[in-house]
Amino acid sequence: MPGDLDPEPRIKQWKDDLGKAFRNTLYEQDDLTHLQALTAPRGHYLQNLKSIDELLERDLQREKDGFPRKIRIGRLIKVGKGGKEKIVVVPTTVEEKLIHDLKADSSKTEDQSGGSGEGNDGQVIGEEPVHGTEGSGTGGAGQGESGEHEIESSAFDLGRILTEKFNLPNLTEKGKKRSLKKFTYELTDRNKGFGQVLDKKATLRKIIETNINLNTIPDVAQIDPARLLVSPQDSVYRILSKEQDFESQAMVFFVRDYSGSMSGKPTEVVVTQHVLIYSWLLYQYDRQVETRFILHDTEAKEVPDFNSYSSLSVAGGTKVVSAYRLVNEIVERENLSRDYNIYVFHGTDGDDWDTTGKETIPELRKMALYSSRVGITVANRGGSALEKTIKDSRVLEEYMKQLRLVVIEEEAEESRLIEGIKQLIS
Amino acid sequence: MELINQHTKRIMEGCKDRAKEAGLQFQDETLEYIVTNKDLLELMPKNMIPTLYDYWVHEVEVLKEKGKYELYPYNPYETVINTRPAMSFYNDNNPDWLNVMIFYHVLAHIDFFQNNLFFKHTWQEDFAGQALSDKRSIALLRSEKGRFVDYVIEFTRGIDNLVGFYNELSDLNRPAGNKSAGKLDFYFDLFLQTIVRVPFHEYLKEVDRYNETTGRFGSMAESIFFSQVSKKYPEFEALYTTRQKSKKPKSRDLIDFIADHSPFLQKEENRWMKTVMEIVRKTSLYFQPQIRTKILNEGWASYWHEKLFINDDRIKGNEVAFARVNAKVTALPRMGLNPYALGMRLFSYLEGLADQGRISYAFQRLESIGGRSGFDQKTGQGRDFVSQVRENFNDFMFVNTFVDQDFVDTYKLFVAGKRLNPQKEVWEYYIQSRKASDYKAMLLESLYHPPHIVIGEPKSQDRSLYLDHQFEGKPLVREFIAHTLLGIEYLWGGPVKLETSEPIEKPEPPLAYSYNLYDPVPTDGKSSRQDKAQFGRVLYTMENRKLSRSLL
C-alpha cells in the first residue's frame, strides 16, 4: 500500500484518531469488536422499512393512548470511513432514564480522559480543528456525490413517512402536476449494418458466431483470422437514439447562512430541517426534484452537493441579501421559473448587517414573485435582526401565499422541527 | 447461530484442561456458538442474550447504528454469557491459533463470573433458560393485553437502572444465624413490653421462667413455655399469627416498591403488570455486576489469555501474529481508556507487589526510597493475591484501592485534557497531570454510576409517590425526567414527585465587566457563567401526565 510508505497520512490519521480516542469510554469496548476484530453489524435502512412502518404505527397509537411519541426520524449521523463522510437517515429512539448528566458537571472545567506514554505536564499531543470537517480539507466533488446518493436513497422513504405519519400536508397542486417530457439522445442502441460508431467488440463476437455456424472454425482454441468470412451484416454499430426523460418539476434552493455565529446548534437545526424538507418534496414530486445549494456570509456562493452544504463554515459577518440576490440571478439566468415549481428554503440565525432591510426586502419581494414557496427558518430565540426587518416590512402579509417565516429555538427537538416544516409548507 | 464444529470444540477442551491446571475454576460444561453478521444484528440489542424478551426498542436499535449512547450509559453486549452452562460467541472465520487465545480469554471470563462475589445472585441460575420462559410469558401476555405490555416494559425499563443490586447482594451475603425475629423475640421484645406493658419485675420473672424451662426440658422448652403463656394471655397466639401475616418483606428497590404498594397495580385487572415488571427487574439485575466489573473482568481475562497462550505449545509458528492481535487488545493507548489494558496492567502490577511481599504493613511503613526499592520478601504469594482480588473486588474498589503513584509511574499514565486554542481555532489534547490522585479521580469519574434515588416520606398527605434524589454533585439529565416520571406515574396510578438538585442560574454579570476597552468584543459569555454553578433543590411533580417544576 502506498500509504504505508508515506508517513504523512498516517501521522495525520493518528492525530485525527486522538480526538476519537479521547471520547472513548470504558464501556464502548467489548470482546467481539476488540478481541475478535468483528465490525459492528449494520442493518440497511431500506431492508428495515417494513418494520419502520410498524414502529411508526405504534408511535401513532402511543399518541392516542396519551403518551408522547418516542420515535424520532431524520437524525443525521456522519459515518467517517477512510476520510469520507456519509449522511444516513435513520429512525432513533432514546430510552429515558434518570441518569447523571455528565456534561452538566460544572465542577469540572474541562473534559478529561486517560492516556499513556512520554511527555511533560502541559505538553500538547494532538489537535483537532474546532469546525469539524472544514479544517481537514478533504473536500472534492467525487466525495460529495457519494454522500448525496446515500441521502437520496433513503430520503424518498423518509418523505413518505413524514407525509403519512407526521401528517405533513400534501401539496395542493399535486393533482395538476405538469409532466414535461424531455428528450435526450444517447449512443446506447445497437444496429446491424449501419450506424454512427462501429462497436468493435460486438462485431468480432458476431463474426465468430457466423463463422462457427459456417463451420470455418475447426478448433476454437486456435482461430486463424485469415480464414474467417466477414459479412457486411456482421458489423454492429452504435446508433443515436431518442430517449424520453421526465423533467424534474420542482427546483429547490436550499440557502444557508454559514457565518461564524451559526456554528454548532443553529447549523444543526437548519441542516436537519432542510433534510426533512428535501425528503418531503422528493416524495411529493415523486423523485422529480432538483436541488441547488447556496451558502452565504457576506458573499453568497453555490456549492455542488449536500455534503459541503451541511458541513462548511466560515468566520465572518452576515449579509442575507447576497444570497437572495444570487438565487434571483440563477433563476433569471437559467430561466427556471418557466419550467419549475421553485422553492427556496433559507436557514439562518437571524443576523443581518442590513438592519433596515433596505436591500434585503426588495430582493425577497422579487423572489416571492416566481416562487411557490419561500420558507425562512430563524434558529434563534426570537428578536433577531432579520426577523424584525421582515416583520416590519409587512412583506409576509403582502405575499401570504408565498412567504413563511418560522422562528425555532436553537435547542429545538425534532417534533418542533417537523412542526416548523408544517408552518413553512402549509 | 450454530455450535462450533467438533474440531474447534476439541481445541476448547484442550484449553479447559490447561486453564484448570493453571488454577482457574469453572464448571466443565460450556456452549460455543458461531455468530454471523445477521445473528449479531439480532443479538446486539438484546445484549447477546438470544432468549431475551422481544421489545420494540430492540427493533429500533437494530435499525440505528451504534454510537448514540453519548449521554446514556449502555450495558455493552458481551461474548460470554454468564449462565449455566456458560455460552460464548465467535466470529466464523477465526484461525485455530486465534481461537486458542480467545478460548483462554473466555475461560477466564467464565472463571470470573463463577467466582466473583458480585455475581453471587447469578450463580444458581440458568439465565438463558430463565429468559426463555420470561420471553414466553411476555408473548402470552402480549396476545391478551396487546400494546399495554410494551408500555409496562417501557416504563419499567425507565427505572431499571435504579434496581437494588446491592440490596439483593446483601441479602445473599448475610451471615447465617442472624434471622429475623421469631416467636420468642416477639413475646419478649414486643408483646410484653409494648402490648401488655408488664412491670419490670414481672418481665424479669418471665425471663427467669424461660431460662428455667430451657434448663429442664431442653429442645421441648419452647412449646412448653408458650403453652403456659397462652393460658395467661389467650390473645397471644392470634396476635402473633396476624403479625406474621401482615409482615411483608421490605421492598428491595423502586420497581419492587411500586409493585408492592401501587394502588393501581393492586387492582385485579392490573396484576399481570407485576409479572412484566419483575421480568424487567430481574434482567437488569443480571447485568448489574457486569457493568460494575468491566476493568476487572476484562483485565483478568487479558491477564490470563496472555499468560496461558504464551506457554501453550500451540502458539508455535504464530508468535508474531499473536503479538499483533494481543497488542491491539491490550496496548495502553496514547489517548483514551482501555479497560483490557488497564485491568491487565493492574493485575500484573499487583501480582508483582504481592510476590515481593509489598502489600503489607511492613512495606507501607517504610519511608526511605532506598528501603522501598530494595524491598523483596520473595513470598511468591502473587498468584494467590490476584485470585483474591478477582473474588472480592469490583471496579470501584479495584481502582480506588490499588491505583497509586508507583502504578501510574510504571506505566507512564497521565490524565489527558482538552482545551480550546482560540488563536489556532483547534482543540488541543494535552497532558494534564501525572499525579496518581488525579488519575484515580478521572478513572472513578468515568465508572458507571447510576443516581441514588430513595423513596422518601411523602411531605404531604396525598397518595403521591415521593422520590428523593441524593445529590452527588451531578444533576440528572433534564430532558429525560419528564418521560421517566410519566412512566412511573402510570405504574403508580397517582402523582409522582421527584426532588433533585439542579444548577440555579445566577443573574449574568453586568456587561461592563465583559467588555475590554482595547478590544470591544464581548468575551465568551460561557466562561463567565460557568465558574461555579450553584445547585439548588427543585421538585418535579408529574400529575395527570403534566410535569411541573418548582424551587424548594
Image (cartoon, coloured by chain):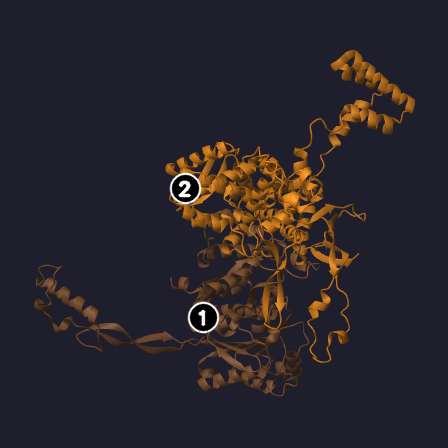
Disc 1 is placed on an element classified as helix
Query: Residue A335 location in percent, x, y?
Result: 45, 85
Disc 2 is placed on an element classified as helix
Relative to A112, residue B302 above or below: above
Mark number, residue B315: 2
Relative to B216, residue B438 above or below: below
What amino acid type should be assigned to the residue bearing mark 2? Answer: Ile
Between A364 and A316, the one lying in front of the other is A316
Query: Residue B44 location in percent, x, y?
Result: 50, 49
What amino acid type should be assigned to the residue bearing mark 1? Answer: Gly
Query: Residue B194 location in percent, x, y?
Result: 86, 29
Between B507 and B520, the one lying in front of the other is B520
Letter of the chain in orange: B
Q: Residues within 10 Å of mark 1 (few under 14, many from 20)?
A: some
Label 1, label 2: how far apart the Cα atoms are:
47 Å
Q: Which color was chain A given?
A: brown
Point 14% across, 65% down: residue: A208
Q: Which residue is mark 1?
A: A144
User: In this orientation, does residue B255 appear?
Assistant: yes
Which chain does tag 2 point to? B
